[in-house]
Image (cartoon, grey):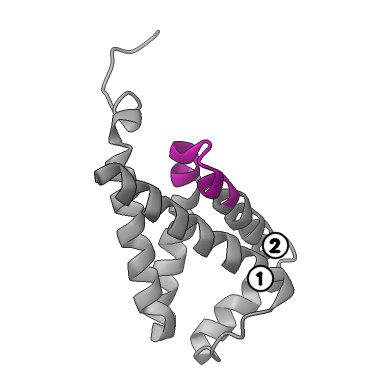
Amino acid sequence: MKEKLLVSARLIYGLMFFVFGLNGFFKFIPLPTPTPAGAAFMEALIATGFIYPMVKCVEILVGISLLIGRYTTLALVVITPILVVITSFHLFLDHSGLSNAIFLVFLHIFLTHGHWKYYKEVLTKKADLR
């Protein structure tokens, strides 16, 4: 049962990042008008010329990785800082997507917990290698 839940969560999580990553380039899902602070933040990301496209490319690649079930643990690590920014954006600048952000955080925590055995080695304190 837990394995089916993990697969379902992974597919939903992957699909969300894949679709919204593509939407960053092709604009096929209309997004609500952001607050002035949210709009200023988004305009700053877009104005850099590379941050916004890079984030959207990472979202697409992570989404694909999660959808096909390859490198899931790495995908969860890579998407974590982006998820922190998404959640912070909706928490502090534009509350319109906060429920989606909270849902993503829930899925992320659930998936990370489900793959915890793969993180244990990295998070184990070891003797200095000098």
- Residue 6 x %, y %: 34, 47
Position of residue 10 in the picture relative to residue 51 (left or right): left
Residue numbers of the magenta segment: 64-77
- Which of 81 and 107 lies nearest the eye of the viewer? 107
Magenta stretch mostly in which secondary structure?
A: helix
Q: Where is residue 124 in the image (x, y as percent from the top left)?
A: 27, 24
Q: Badge 2, how many Cα within 10 Å: few under 14, some, many 20+?
A: some
The circle on residue 53 is 2
Q: Is residue 16 above or below residue 26?
A: above
**Position of residue 6 in the picture relative to residue 30 (left or right):** left
Residue 3 seen in this snapshot: yes
Q: Is residue 91 visible?
A: no
Q: Is residue 74 magenta?
A: yes
- Say which residue appears at 47% left-offset and 40% top-offset: 72
- Element type at mark 2: helix
Q: Residue at x 56, y 77 (%)?
A: 41
Q: What residue type is labelled 1?
A: Gly
- The vertical placement of 101 against 109, above or below, is below
What's the distance in space between the residues labelled 2 and 1, CA to CA? 8 Å
Residue on which disc 1 sits? 24
Q: How crowded is mark 1: few (under 14 residues within 10 Å), some or many (20 or more)?
A: some
Q: Which of disc 1 and disc 2 is earlier in sequence? A: 1
Q: Which residue occupies the foreground of this view, 66 or 7?
A: 7
Q: Please state which of residues 43 and 17 is positioned toward the viewer in this rendering.
A: 17
Amino acid, disc 2: Pro
